[in-house]
Image (cartoon, grey):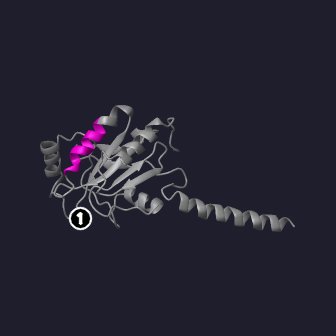
Amino acid sequence: MNNIYKSAFKRAALTLGIFASYVSPNTVAAGGVEYYKFPSIYGGTIDTKQWQGKPYLVVNTASQCAFTKQYASLQELYDKYREAGFGMVAVPSDDFNQELDSDAEVKNFCELNYDIDMPMSETLSVRGQEAHPFFKAVKAQSGFAPTWNFNKILIGGNGEIIDTWGSLTSPLSTKLTRAIDDELSKPQEIWPQ
């Protein structure tokens, strides 16, 4: 009789687990995305641990893309929320063959054309075998990988993947800013160590 209850419990748990995976595809198991470090285009390191308990956005960027003008909106978004603790990392990438040849050129282009001062990494790969570990983790946990430049990944205060958006979604879109507002309004939590 005891085995019947165990078997029924296992079936119920399995069914619930399968259902949960369909209902919340961006929920990350085991506490969310770990802390990651990105080499900064300004020198030093960008460590996502600095945004413990606060949301941050990671965007793969390129300087020679039809969506490059989104740099202005990204900077505006960063300026709007940075005082509240919101973080952002722009990740230049040549995975789609639309980035300048050197980090110095990327940095100068962004500063001169868009007056960028948001955190920006060196040029990195964002997909495939050579992808930065952050992007590999996001793909492993949510199935999302950038399909073009200016894809956006919002990470919540406790490390969960809140949502992802493609190139066509403006950084200042209602759906993206609403998601940031929702995350900033949550009680501050500390990620697992």
Q: Quadrant of the N terminus?
A: bottom right
- Judging depth in this view, the residue of 166 and 153 nearest the camera is 166
* Amino acid on which the number 1 mark rests in the picture: Phe
User: Which residue in the structure is indicated by mark 1?
Assistant: 96
Principal secondary structure, stretch drawn in magenta: helix
The kind of secondary structure element at disc 1 is loop
Q: Residue furthest top?
A: 83
- The residue drawn where x is 35% and y is 41% is 87
Q: Nearer the viewer, residue 29 or 17?
A: 17
Asked where in the image residue 147 lies, by quadrant, the reply is bottom left
| Left or right, residue 66 beside residue 185 | left
The residue segment tinted magenta is: 69-79
Q: Nearer the viewer, residue 144 or 35?
A: 144
Q: Position of residue 146 (x, y in %)?
A: 33, 61
Relative to 119, 98 lies left or right: left
Question: Residue lying furthest right in this view?
Answer: 1
65 within the magenta span: no
Horizontal side of residue 54 vs 6, given as left or right = left
x and y percentages locating residue 153 in the rendered image: 37, 52
Residue at left 33%, top 58%?
166
The magenta stretch spans residue 77: yes
